[in-house]
Image: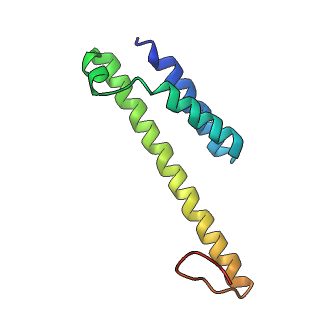
Amino acid sequence: MNPHFPAMEAALEGLATAIRTSDAPAIHAASEALAVAVSGIDGAFADRLGRPDRDKLADFIARLQTLSMEVNLHSQWTRQRIDSLADLRGQRHLKSGLYC
């Protein structure tokens, strides 16, 4: 197994946990840890991997994309919630995203 994978896996799990608990400082710290963990990954790195490690890298990328979709869904839900609350208060929504 490639030595980068344990750190990448741990950072991804930390980020997933932080996002699911909506802990902003933990999200920031986990994002930084993930950035450091994947900083050595590039096309040349992937080309040097054997088949099992390439499959593991592909799985890691798929899980990262899934986590990204979760963040996007959460962001959309939050935006809808803000819009709904603004409507209840009688505030009008402007295109810039500001409320009056």
Which residue is more in the foreground, 96 or 49? 96
In percent of the image, x 67 and y 83: which residue is there? 87
The x and y percentages for residue 23 are: 71, 44
**Residue displayed at 58% across by 34% down:** 32
Q: Is residue 26 left or right of residue 13?
A: right
Seen in the image, is 64 located left or right of residue 47? right
Q: Residue furthest left?
A: 47
Above or below, comparing residue 99 to residue 35 in the picture = below
Which quadrant of the figure has residue 14?
A: top right
Image spot of residue 17 (x, y percent): 64, 37
Of residues 76 and 27, the one nearer the viewer is 27
**Residue at position x 68%, y 84% from top?**
100
Describe residue 68's horizontal placement relative to residue 84 as left or right: left
The x and y percentages for residue 85 are 70, 76
Give above or below for 73 relative to 83.
Answer: above
User: Which quadrant of the view contains residue 3?
Assistant: top left
